[in-house]
Structures are given as structure tokens and as C-alpha cells.
Amino acid sequence: MIIGKTSFNYYGVLIVLSMFVGAFYIYYSIKKEGFKNKEHMFLYFMLFFSSVIILGKMFTVIVSDENVNLLNAGFSSYGGLIGVILSSFIFEKIVPFDNKIIKYSIISLPLSYSIGKIGCFIAGCCYGIPYNGFLSVTYTNGLNIPLFPVQLIEAIIFMILFLIFNHLKNNKNIIYITIILSALMKFLLDFLRYEHLTKTISVNQVFSLILIFCMFILILKNKKQFSK
């Protein structure tokens, strides 16, 4: 398939949509669990959106090789992840709700990421390795060569992961399961991105490994505390 330049900002619209869909999932889930204080909900989502947007862009600025700032920088999924974790953790300390805010915020991540990757596919960012097979995509405003549609594959896989994690939401280890499997899948899929033609390992992959390592440390720490 061939994708050319468009005047409509599909990327921006889908990124915003991904955040709102994720927020709606969190809202619906915690309301179903009995959290109904509207003022507290408003406070949380203000914190949620501001943290995700600022840290999502800030992460891009920090790791980017190009001259970008907070206004023109793209949106980093791992920056958004940090924003979600930070905002839910802070809110849980202010308004304790048995870690359900944190749980549903983490489960929402693959859902939001899946929608956001459709925006990346249309915009032509985060594109895949050269590939001339089934579903290859050519960006006439970019490299203008057939590429692997890694963004679409990511969108499909992470939507499936979200459905699985949501089904397992009552599992006591669902937060760890969600973060570890999501980070592992992102680590593996990153090998299909174009930048791996010149890099052995990407910044996203390094962060994925750090995240997985931290989760296993927390699991071991919690097991030791439980056994005492």
C-alpha cells in the first residue's frame, strides 16, 4: 500500500483519542469498583492528562538525536508510561483506593498504545525495516521504499494483550504481568523498526529491559515481605 502526505493531522487526533479511550477505560473500571467521588475523579484525570502529555513529550526530547522541543516533539510511549505510573501512584497516595487506580491505569496502557500506533502508521513515523512482502507500505513523503508495517502489527498485538490483561484483571499480579509482557513485546517488535539497520539496540529496548528487571525486583521484594 502507498501512503502520501495529508493535510489532516491523523497522528495528533489518534494520539489524543488514545489517551481519552484509556482514560474512559480507567473511569469505567474504577466506577464499577465503587469509586464514585466526582471531585476526586476530576483531580485524577487532570493529573493523568498533564503527566502523560508532558512526560510523553519530554522523553522524546531527551532521547531524540534531532533538535526538538516540547512543542514540536513527537509523543513517546515510554514517556506516557512514566506519566501514567507517576500520576496513578501519586493519586493513590492522596486518595487510597486499594491500588485499583494503579491497576486499571496500567491495564489501560496497551489499549492506548494500540490506538496510538495506528496514528504512527498513517503518519509514517516509527516505520519498519525494508520489506517488499504482504502488507508492505510505502511512504511517498518519506523514504519512498516498501517497508514492513510494524506499527500495524504493534497495534494488533497490543490490542490483543489489552483484552487478555483485562480478562485477568482480578489476578493479584496483574500489574507485574501487564508491564513485563508489554515491555517484552515492545523489546521484540523494536527489532522490526528501521533504526535497527544502524543500531544494535535502541533506547526503547534498553528501557524495556530496565523496566522488566525492576518488575522482577519488586516481585521478589514482595515475596520476601509476604513470607516474613
Image (cartoon, rainbow, N blue to C red):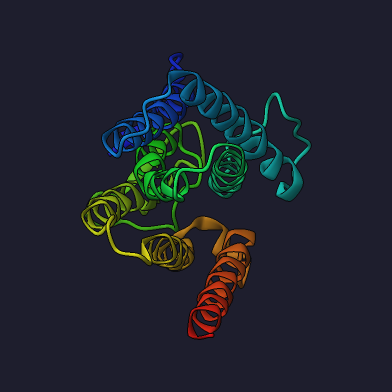
Q: Position of residue 210 (x, y in %)?
A: 62, 69
Q: Is residue 80 above or below residue 18?
A: below
Residues 42 and 159: in front is 42
Determine the image quadrant of residue 58.
Answer: top right
Q: Is residue 62 left or right of residue 57?
A: right
Q: Residue at x 40, y 64 (%)?
A: 185
Q: Position of residue 71 (x, y in %)?
A: 70, 24
Q: Residue at x 24, y 49 (%)?
A: 135
For the residue pair 144 and 96, the one nearer the viewer reads as 96
Where is residue 22? Give x, y as percent.
38, 35
Is residue 9 toward the left or the right of residue 201 in the image? left
Against 135, residue 72 (above or below) is above
Kindly give the residue lying farthest to the top in the view shown.
7
Q: Relative to 119, is 99 above or below?
A: below
Q: Quadrant of the N terminus?
A: top left
Q: Is residue 156 left or right of residue 9?
A: left
Q: Tell which of 10 and 84 is nearer to you.
A: 84
Asked if 218 appears above or below 57 in the picture, the reply is: below
Q: Position of residue 127 (x, y in %)?
A: 46, 48
For residue 76, what is the image quadrant? Answer: top right
